[in-house]
């Protein structure tokens, strides 16, 4: 009987350990804000004629835009701009790209999503880029 109880207890501990390691990532909107402002805004100001503030879209519009993964009028992948390869290519001239060089791409994208959702027209804290 003790052996069965020990096996059940060990199985429960392993199950709880595995469940804890599969938790969803809790996005960091502050890190997303830093990256968005220092990388996205800087690029838009230099190459696209001006910044794109989070308040230009609603949360639903941002979600659709990010899900579509289209950038530059559909010519490029949005995910390219959070890729480690892209960050590596600009880190010599961009402090945020250098600072977040080792952040996993999906985490950084989630951070940016959290920031634009918070700063969207209908977000908790509509934000303008500065």
Image (tube, rainbow, N blue to C red):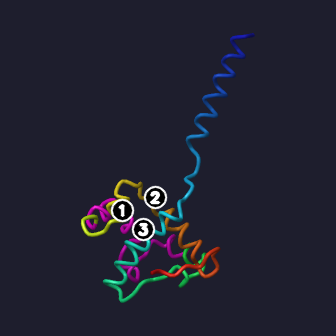
Q: Position of residue 30 (x, y in %)?
A: 51, 65
Q: Which residues are magenta?
A: 64-90
Residue drawn at the location 35% of the way across and 59% of the way down: 99
Position of the C terminus by quadrant: bottom left
- Label located before the other in sequence (2 or 3): 3
Picture quadrant where residue 37 is located: bottom left
Residue corresponding to mark 3: 35
In this rendering, which labeled residue sits more in front, label 2 or label 3?
Answer: 3
Front residue of 10/118: it is: 118
Residue at the farthest right position = 1
Q: Secondary structure at mark 3?
A: helix
Residue drawn at the location 41% of the way across and 71% of the way down: 78
Left or right side of 130 for 48: left
Residue corresponding to mark 1: 83
Residue corresponding to mark 2: 106
Magenta span: predominant SS is helix
- Label located before the other in sequence (2 or 1): 1
């Amino acid at each position: 009987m003790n052996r069965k109880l020990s096996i059940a207890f060990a199985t429960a501990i392993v199950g709880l350990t595995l469940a804890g390691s599969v938790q969803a990532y809790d996005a960091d909107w502050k890190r997303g804000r830093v990256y968005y402002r220092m990388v996205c805004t800087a690029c838009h100001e230099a190459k696209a004629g001006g910044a794109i503030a989070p308040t230009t879209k609603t949360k639903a519009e941002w979600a659709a835009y990010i899900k579509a993964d289209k950038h530059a009028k559909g010519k490029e992948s949005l995910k390219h701009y959070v890729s480690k390869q892209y960050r590596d290519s600009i880190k010599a001239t961009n402090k945020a790209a250098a600072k977040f060089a080792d952040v996993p791409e999906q985490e950084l994208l989630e951070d940016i999503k959290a920031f634009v959702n918070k700063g969207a027209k209908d977000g908790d804290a509509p934000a303008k880029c500065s």
